[in-house]
Amino acid sequence: MLQGYPGKKRLPTGVARIVRLQGPIRLDKHAAPASLVAGFAVAAALVVLSRLDLGAEALRLCLQVSVAMTIGELFFACLFIGRISKDRRQIAESEQRFRRAMEDSAIGIAVVGLDGRFVQTNPAFASMLGYSREEIEALTFFQITHPDDLHVGRETMEGIKAGTVNAFQFEKRYLKKDGTAVWAHLAGSVIREEKSGRPLYLVSQIEDIDARKQAKARIAEAETRWNFALAGAGQGVWDLDIRKGGTTYSSALVKMLGYADGELDGDPDRWLTMIHPDDRETVAEADRAHLDGQTEFFEAEFRMRHKDGRWIWILDRGKAIERDGDGRLVRAIGSLTDITRRKEAEERLTVSAAMLADEKERLRVTLQSIGDAVICTNAANRVTFMNPVAEKLTGVPAEAALGKTLGHVYWAVDEETGHRIGVTRPAIGAETPSDQNSRAVLVRRDDIRCSIRQVVSPIMNERNEFCGLVIVFQDFTDARALQRQLAHAAAHDALTGLANRSSFIRTMEEIVDQARKDAAGAGGSDHQFMFIDLDHFKLVNDTGGHAAGDALLKRVAQAVRGVLGPEDSVARLGGDEFAVILKSGSTAGARIAARSVIDAIAGLNFTWDARPHAIGASIGVAAINANSGEADEIIARADAACYAAKAAGRGCVCVAPDDKSRPPAPLAAAS
């Protein structure tokens, strides 16, 4: 809060000079009547003495005294008149000087009555507030004072009336004519009546300080931002000035170290005593290097003792900005930054890096030792790692592979299709599961092929960004061969190599389902099924033994396979029973094919132990279409047709009718 300042302050104004002249003027006005009274008294004395009976000497003496007093009175009257004229000239000159000072002053001047009204103002004051002199002199200072600052003027006025304030100065805001506020500095005196001391009016000088206030506010705001930035960054500022006798520290700096403002100021060497003993030599060396001009800036990281005794890490950066004629340091400025958290993070990173290095070494040894081949790539699909097993399987040494694209080292194709198995980065935003493939074949640069089982896993970082691939693969050649053998054995007859009953039934069911889908209810025939049963085969087994029977079955299988097309499916259902699925969907085609099978079997010249054996075959044919029923029904109809062929004399073909109620019609062997 702004308030008045007691005490008398003389202002160099005409009003003040006028006040000083009022005392002598009143004394001269009292002396003039006294002189006139004295003159009249002398004249009266002469008249009285002339009537008295006095001697000549006495009369002469009285006359001389009267003349002398009269002359004296005339002399004093002349002096009095001259003094009055001089005082009048001085008053006129003082008033003129006051008027000129008022009119020509660069700052505002106002004479204000005790009621707050403006008695007189100068142009500078009126211009400062945007009024004319006539307009502003019609107002009171209360009307043009900012509402928030009215108490300042009232308190000053109360002090003036109470006799406690004779001079004043303060800052307050005025309201300009357009309503905007302007800051002003007031300095003035109270003009009082000389005898009674009663206040008459106030004379004030008003200086426009709005620009200064705004600049000060901007500086304060900038300083606040600067201090906030320093505090937010954990920084403080130090200023070493030898001429001022030491070092001063900013509030942020001393707070950083746990001290109060000013507690560390002074001794320029005190900061050295606060440095950790293990760091002092390093800091001193950096300080000497800068003072000797070897470095542009002084910079050092060290530990300083906090007021509570703990150590905090500090980054100190400074620069000598002034030296004396002999090159000695005069002034330097710098900053301290609390880097404790950074140092702790660096220490954690160091520990983590050491642990990571250990883990990386363990991983390297593991990858070098495992039986699986491992290849790693980066995001650009270039090889970054290969273990010895991968070198052996690919035939490419790691030294030659590192930095090369993956295709230069690793080329895998699908075992069945022969198409290359792509090993690429996943699509952006797509899920990234591991890709497993058990049908891959690795094609080496020397064209050697080996079956492999591979697992390709993408490497994603914490931001879900693709960083590369890890390909783990194994030599699966022997296992794949065994797997193929087992799969073949599971689906084929061990003796003849034809499809066995279970795999044939699955194929039959698939064809029946497909026929239904393709026919879409049209009832058209898509395939023909033949049931083959050998004639006189039991005699071979009985006379030649099972070895002879097995050998004959192999010959039969070859004969049947030899007269049919590659798309026809042939199976051994068991014993001396065989089955065929003909691609041809016509009955006539089935008859021709069946006749060819019968002829091929009958034409076998089979001899066992120098003894010839002759066999034949009877065949039942049934259509496979959308209306033929399930697979087992079709097989049953064909089986029934086969028995009908046997009953008709063997060695012939019998076709099962589409009408399930009619018996199959056998065909003669010669037909």
Image (cartoon, rainbow, N blue to C red):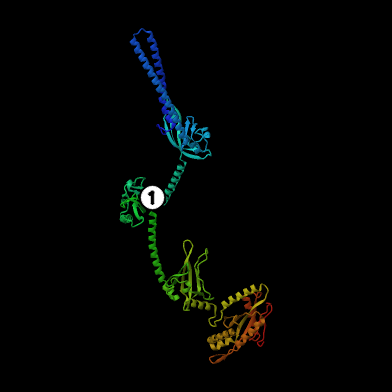
Type of the residue with mark 1: Gly
Q: Give the percent coordinates (x, y) of residue 310.
A: 34, 51
Identify residue for label 1. Answer: 236
**452 or 186, which lies in front?**
186
Residue displayed at 63% across by 76% down: 633
Q: Please name the residue shown 55% across and 92% down the image.
A: 611
Residue 153 visible at all: no
Number of numbered discs present?
A: 1
Left or right: where does residue 390 sit relative to residue 310?
Answer: right
Quadrant in the picture for the N terminus: top left
Q: Is residue 542 above or below residue 370?
A: below
**572 vs 585, nearest the viewer:** 585
Residue 638 horizontal side relative to residue 219, left or right: right
Residue 313 x, y percent position in the rendering: 36, 54
Q: Nearer the viewer, residue 650 or 172?
A: 172
Direction from residue 103 to residue 603 in the image, left or right? right
Q: Is residue 103 visible?
A: yes
Judge whether 548 appears above or below 136 on screen.
below
The x, y position of residue 57, in whole percent, is 33, 11
Q: Quadrant of residue 499?
A: bottom right
Tag 1 secondary structure? strand
Name, please, the residue furthest toward the bottom: 610
Packing grade of label 1 (10 A; few <14, some 14-19, many >=20) is: many
Q: Quadrant of the C terminus?
A: bottom right
Query: Does residue 197 lie above or below 437 as drawn?
Result: above
Occupied quadrant, residue 196: top left
